[in-house]
Image (spheres, helix red, strand yellow):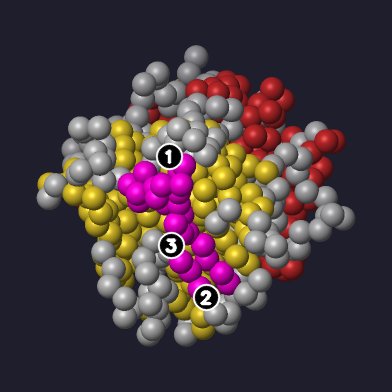
Amino acid sequence: MDISVPTMTWNGETALLPIRSDSTPWNDIVSLRESRGEEVFLRKMTKALKKNLLRLPKKTRQQWATESLTLEPWEELSAGDEALRDFWLSCQKQPNSDETIAAFQAWIESRTDGQKYSLWETWHLLSALILSGAQLADAIFWQVWNLGAEAFLQIRSELDAPDGAEGELDEFLIAGVEIRWLALAVYPEIEEASQLPKQARKALSDWSEGFFPVIGNPDAEDLHRLPCIWRSLARTSLLCTELKENYFRKSDQKELRKLLTTTCRLAGAEGSLLISIDRLPWSFLHELSQQVATKKQSGLVDLLKTYASPSKAGKAKHSKKQNLPNGKPCHQLDDCAWSVLRTDWTAEADCCSVLHQDSSVHLNARTPKLDLLTGAWELEIEVNGKAVPINGDWEATCWHTDSDGDYLELQQSLADDITVDRQIFLSRKDHFLYFAEVVHVPDDAALTVRSNLPFTEGLNLAQDKYTREWQIKQKKKLAARLFPVAFDQEVVNKTDGRISASDTGVTIERSSTGSQYLPMVIDWHPHHIAAPAEWRKLSITQARNATPSFQAGGYRLRLAEQHLFMYRSMVKPYSPRAILGEHTLNESLIGKFDSEGDVLPLLVVEE
């Protein structure tokens, strides 16, 4: 027989929490309601409930309440949600204070009769009881405890996401997994308590299998929630440790290893992610890797240890002696619509993430000392004076990685035989990024291309006085240089376009007749910061005839000892084209001149 413990009346209704008949001391206390009255019943019940709450160690409570483990909202908060968060935060500091009581009452007053509880509300009520329930003022404890029970009972049938459900990845994780463990910790007396661990572990397994297109790899649109995913897993881990429960099945270890590896590929300097400024609970990731990694993955464990120890992460240097993960640090997946170009596994790597899940392309490029690019790589095209909508999906048409660097090419087909290719190349050793817009239009079409590179807010962008070079400064110190090599170098010479800076970055605009190749180079090599720069457009011939620029383009850029070569064909050649003595039938070529003037290829893309 189940005993139903009624709550205080709230909004004219009474919530019921099913309690197992063998639970004590509920049998004795419930009888007091009839014999001794409501006041004695509430006092005794409150004392018993506080005593029965799971007691988290002080260190665990502090970890849970730190900024690195807080719950981030999935949408803009209402005034009521803000009040509930204020209550939760106040619970951590002064759970028995008038401010805490006032914040709770403000949330109560914000709700309407019969309003359904949200996941946000359920999580905050249950976690407040876990973190500070024993210290809460008696005036509100009974109500918090009961409303948490009411909220859990109301949403428990919706915790498992049905096929096709929409929402954030961490939202499904918190609902299916974390809420169940919280309910077990707060309400161990409920009839279904014994089933909650099994349900939570199954929900975690279903989540990892059902919401990743490829094992351990979120879609591009979900990457920004990775910090929130790891926070939820970390909070749950802390809770399960105190409950003496395993929070995942052994069969889930493969998915968790893959997710750990994916996260490391996206890690930037100082432990943040390329796709988010939020820090991750690296200590938890390291502990988890020790549990799930195989012997062959000891490099992953060691790498996560450096991120878990900030002093080590800051000093980490790539060397042959350092134990690093197996496999390449770069990553590309067509199904997930994102890529990472990365020089090595360590925190000292140069890296660039590229997200292309819709008509826009989002870039995040970082060096160990510089947040270089952050935001949308915007593109505008006009053909014969009319704007061409950029509203299709970008497709990754070429991916290549080797000891010289990582290369990604994206393509989008537009209306009226107009095609755009975007090239991105990150040098493995020489600290530069190459970007190019390649726009294909009819030979007689008047074309204007505007390409905006999204430099990170806070950087100082300024054009050189005598050339069209742009300097990127951080705190007044020159940190990188942008070379728009498709333009004449000297500002005194007329050019068919313009370059300008704005709050969103640097916009390069160029006009032409026919197809256009618009390359750009960003260099941050410490030996090149003060070095003189020289770049030139190169002449191209085919069968001894000059090749027009709408068929192919070539440029060179010299910086100190480095002399780069860039070439792109827009029309397939019928015979090899000659450019500075180099003969090629290839579509793209990026290389370096050696001391003899020969081109040493860094990248070759065949036609």
Camera-nearest residue between 412 and 13: 412
User: Could you tell me which residue is drawn at 21 percent across and 33 percent down?
Assistant: 415
Position of residue 280 in the picture relative to residue 38 (left or right): right
Is residue 134 rendered to the left or right of residue 297? left
Does residue 241 appear left or right of residue 128 in this picture? right
Residues at marks 3 and 1, CA–CA distance in whole angstroms: 24 Å
Dot 2: element: strand
Q: Residue flagged by tag 2: what amino acid is it?
A: Ala
Label 1 near label 3: C-beta < 8 Å?
A: no
Q: Where is residue 558 in the image (x, y as percent from the top left)?
A: 56, 69
Q: Mark 2 points at which residue?
A: 533
Kind of residue indicated by mark 3? Lys
Residue 537 disc label: 3
Q: Nearer the viewer, mark 3 or mark 1?
A: 3
Residue at the (39%, 61%) spot, across then down: 486
The residue at the far top in this view is 1
Figure quadrant of residue 330: top right
